[in-house]
Image (tube, grey):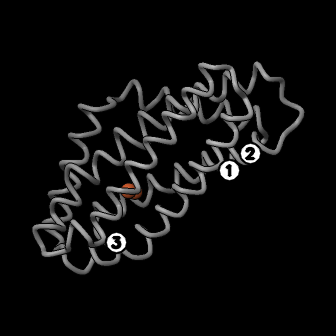
Amino acid sequence: MGKATQDLRNEHDAILHVFEILDKMLSADVKEDVDIFKFGNELIYFLKTFADKCHHGKEEDHLFKALIARGIPNEGGPIGAMLQDHRLGREYISLKSKSLEAKDLNNFKVNAAKYRDHLRNHIAKENNVLFVMADRVLDDATQNGLFEKFEAHEETVIGHGVHEELHSMIRQWEDEFNV
Ligand SMILES: [Fe+2]
Ligand SMILES: [Fe+2]
């Protein structure tokens, strides 16, 4: 497995771990509304910063372009389908955000569950299909070059301080929701 696809798979694992916490939150009646609003706002921050800007940014700005250059189809093909998934994910994030602004907790939960199901499905498609194709068509030098671009992307898009902040946010959720 290449260095770049492995990095993206590791990020998928981090996102899936956050969804386990979300599952707990959605099924827990013990939490006060105020806690759910706090968690909801933090979750949106995590998803916008890590899942979208960092992770989807690495895929769209670097991996997908390298795959298109190797002949994997965009429009009407697997890359186009992944881009469409990313767009739909952004719409769900926006719906969740609007639900919280309107203090509509039920709508937030409905959209959070839809987003989670959508992204779990998307991650499975990438792990089992697209990244397998990527490992076939990208040689080690290209994977290593992509990994270097990913590191630069992380530095410019999120930076060390924010990365640490996201980690401590996840640790706090683990404590709060016993995950
Ligand atoms: Fe993706
Ligand atoms: Fe991904």
Q: Are marks 3 and 1 in contact (CB under 8 Å)?
A: no
Quarter holding residue 68: bottom left
Q: Amino acid at mark 3?
A: Leu
Q: Indicate the quadrant where residue 8 lies.
A: bottom left
- Which comes sooner in the sequence, label 3 or label 2? 3
Q: Which residue is mark 1?
A: 20
Percent x, y of residue 28:
84, 40
Q: Answer yes or no: do the residues labelled 2 and 1 have beta carbons within 8 Å?
A: yes
Assign the C terminus to one quadrant of the image.
Answer: top right
- Work out how far the residue at label 3 is from the one at label 1, CA to CA, in angstroms: 24 Å
Q: Position of residue 6 (x, y in %)?
A: 36, 63
Residue 163 relative to residue 150: left or right? right
Ligand 2 in which quarter: bottom left
Q: Is residue 113 above or below residue 50?
A: below
Residue on which disc 2 sits: 179
Residue depth check, mark 2 versus mark 1: number of the one nearer the observer? 1
Eye-nearest disc, 3 or 1: 3
Query: Which kind of residue does numbered mark 2 sit on?
Result: Val
Q: Is residue 23 left or right of residue 51?
A: right
Residue at image location 70% in from the left, 26% down from the top: 104
Q: How far is mark 2 from mark 1, CA to CA?
A: 7 Å
In the image, residue 40 above or below residue 79 = above
Q: Hey, what amino acid is under mark 1?
A: Glu
Residue tagged 3: 130
Q: Quadrant of the N terminus?
A: bottom left
Label 2: element kind:
loop
Q: Earlier in the sequence, mark 3 or mark 1?
A: 1
Lower position in the chain sequence, tag 2 or tag 1 = 1
